Amino acid sequence: MKPQAFIFVGRSGSGKGTQAALLIDVLGQKDPARKIFTVETGKELRKFIEGDSFTQKQAKKIQMGGGFQPSFLAIYNWAKVFIEKYEQDMHMVLDGTSRRLPEAVAIESVFDFYGISDCWVIYLDVHDEEATGRLLARGRADDTHEGIKNRLSGFVQDMKPSIDFFKNNSRFRFLDINGIGKIEDIHADIVKKLGLA
């Protein structure tokens, strides 16, 4: 099995982190000799905003208000993980990377740089009501009613161009996955469509 890249995209609360973790388990079973590189963009940003610099404080205001970080900050946070931790010939599982079009273009340049040609984009499609219920249930500090509403309302403006970029780019194999249902059923659908079942 050659190295592959998997990018999970979708609304906040669509289950990206859950499904990424399940895929990592499958890759570990199917290709145990190969290391797996992971980036959880949201996790990296949450760590970043705990700092005391002016930039970090500004980013924290955006985060707590339910907004998306500017592309330069998102790219900085996930690119830093690549620079420090990626090793040759690893599988990649990226969770929440490329929320905006400049980030999607940047991640394509990452694959060019590292020579990764086998790239999947897994779009978890859920409606706002489902996403809202999930986000409220997980209970993070920035998952307030207002913050969630702001985050989800920006989906079409901020995330759809990125999704369209992947969907219309022959470099990527795009999977449109129904993200509503039992976690194990969604996982089974993903694994089957990836040819890993």
Image: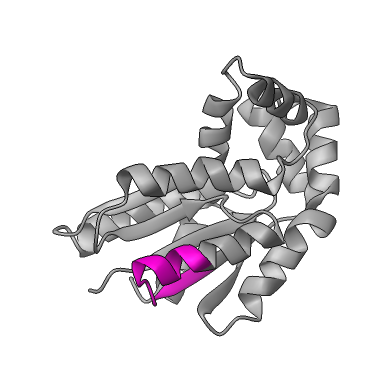
Q: Is residue 32 magenta?
A: no
8 vs 128: above or below? below
Residue at image position (35%, 72%) is 115
Colouring style: one colour
- How many numbered discs, if any? 0
Quadrant (top left, top right, bottom left, bottom right) of the N terminus: bottom left
Image quarter of residue 102: bottom right
* x, y percent for residue 197: 33, 71
For residue 36, say whether it is visible. yes
Look at the image and give the residue range highlighted in magenta: 109-121
Nearer-the-camera pick, 120 or 13 = 120
Q: Is residue 120 magenta?
A: yes
40 vs 137: above or below? below
Residue at image position (33%, 51%) is 37
For residue 40, say whether it is visible. no
* x, y percent for residue 40: 49, 43
Is 61 on the left or on the right of 33, as rendered? Answer: right
Give the residue at the far left of this rendering: 33
* x, y percent for residue 162: 69, 64
* x, y percent for residue 15: 58, 48
Give the residue at the far top of this rendering: 52
Is 2 on the left or on the right of 93, as rendered? Answer: left
Is 76 on the left or on the right of 13, as rendered? Answer: left
Image quarter of residue 80: top left
Residue at image position (77%, 33%) is 66
Give the residue at the far bottom of this rendering: 170
160 vs 117: above or below? above
Residue at image position (57%, 61%) is 106
Image quarter of residue 45: top right
